[in-house]
Image (cartoon, grey):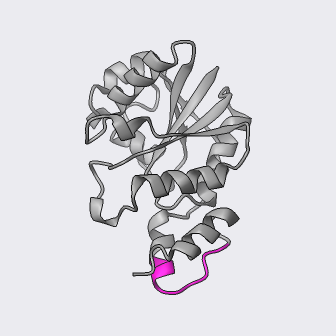
Amino acid sequence: MHIGLFFGSFNPIHIGHMMLANYMAEFTELDKVWFVVSPHNPLKEKSSLLNQNQRLHMVNLAIGDSDLFKSSNIEFGLPQPSYTVNTLAHLKEKYPKYQFSLIIGQDNLVTFHKWKNYEEILKQHKLYVYPRPDVLASELDKHPSVVFTNAPQVEISSTFIRKSIFEKKDMSFFVPEPVWKYIDEMSFYKK
């Protein structure tokens, strides 16, 4: 089983995330995509994050009963901040028969050399890279572990959705319907 790991805060998960995951599962060698909910990205301000279990719940609502997707809270029990190389080691230990690859944006590839133990990650895992607008070439573009995809570009961000909800805009078409109902019911992002 070849699993694509899609890491993110998913604060909230939106249709751009779902479309990208669907593309990766249907148009690449990946069998499934796991949404790995990050408790705290070291590069993001923690105060803007909803509780990790609420974000995991939204991912589960978005996935529904799809066979292509699974949520993962593996990083919830790991030391903070979580580093991808450590998460990969835990996943390989827990699922020795699975092959894991990373799904990352082209913008992340440009800075991938700054990731902890990035050479080790590239030795053992493929990176499925989705295009991002206006991104310069990276020194890793031609690396044998890097697979560029033609995933459609959807310029929607969780930041845009949160800001719009705060401004009392209707964002119901930007997130999966059950996720929108939950956000509305819980009054998330309104304050």
Which percent across, then down, holds residue 139?
36, 32
Which percent across, then down, holds residue 22?
69, 44
Q: Main secondary structure of the magenta part?
A: loop
Q: Is residue 114 above or below residue 89?
A: below
Q: Is residue 25 above or below residue 145?
A: below
Which percent across, then down, holds residue 182?
59, 67
Query: Within the image, what quadrant is residue 147 found in?
Result: top right
Q: Residue furthest bottom?
A: 168
Q: Is residue 177 left or right of residue 137?
A: right
Which percent across, then down, holds residue 8?
45, 48
Q: Is residue 119 above or below residue 84?
A: above
Q: Is residue 61 left or right of residue 187?
A: right
Q: Is residue 56 above or below residue 181?
A: above
Question: Is residue 152 something one can see in this rendering?
Answer: no
**Residue at left offset 28%, top offset 59%:** 46
Q: Residue furthest top?
A: 97
**Residue at left offset 62%, top offset 22%:** 2
Magenta region includes residue 99: no
Specify the quadrant that holds the C terminus. Answer: bottom left
In this view, the residue in front, 124 or 150, is 124
Question: Is residue 94 something one can see in this rendering?
Answer: yes
**Residue at left offset 55%, top offset 57%:** 13
**Residue at left offset 64%, top offset 59%:** 15
Specify the quadrant that holds the N terminus. Answer: top right
In this view, the residue in front, 55 or 121, is 55
Q: Is residue 85 left or right of residue 93?
A: left
In this view, the residue in front, 163 or 56, is 56
Tag count in the figure?
0
Query: Within the image, what quadrant is residue 79 found in?
Result: top left
The boundaries of the magenta stretch are 163-172
